[in-house]
Image: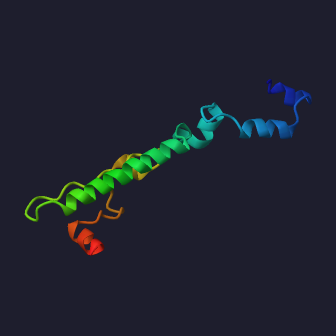
Amino acid sequence: MDLLDWHRGRLTSRRLAVLVKHMPRDSAVAQEIHGESADWTVTDYLLAAAVDHLAAANWMFASVNTDEDADAPEPPVPVPRPGDAASLEGSTDEQATPPGPDDLMRFFT
């Protein structure tokens, strides 16, 4: 497909718009429009969410089953996602603090 075909009148504007809209995620246009999030598919986001939920569940289990005198386990760090500046920089004071063992006990009782 030659882009000059649009200029020559052999390619309609509608067809050109459809071609640009449905370009593959790894194309230069998609990379320019979506940035690094173009590299992640829906499956990648779902896998990252599954990893985050599993890590949170394991942390909750460890927190509830830890001796009262022992140090609480460190809360899990979420998988960094593209375009999420907070996850790339680490936790900030603006983010909500994870629940502690007392919060978990209140929730489950």
Q: Dividing the picture into quarters, in which one does residue 2 lie?
A: top right
Residue placed at 62% from the left, 41% from the top? 33
Residue placed at 71% from the left, 38% from the top? 22
Percent position of residue 101, x then y: 21, 66
Q: Is residue 83 visible?
A: no
Query: Hey, which residue is sitting farthest right in the picture?
Result: 9
Task: Work out whether 12 lies above or below 58.
Answer: above
Q: Is residue 27 left or right of residue 18?
A: left
Q: Nearer the viewer, residue 24 or 28?
A: 24
- Count of labels shown? 0
Q: Dividing the picture into quarters, in which one does residue 8 lie?
A: top right
Q: Is residue 31 left or right of residue 23?
A: left
Quadrant of the drawing holding the C terminus: bottom left
Percent position of residue 19, x then y: 76, 35
Q: Nearer the viewer, residue 109 or 32?
A: 109
Percent position of residue 44, x then y: 49, 42
Q: Is residue 98 left or right of residue 15?
A: left
Residue placed at 26% from the left, 71% from the top? 103
Percent position of residue 71, x then y: 12, 58
Q: Is residue 94 visible?
A: yes
Q: Is residue 65 left or right of residue 32?
A: left
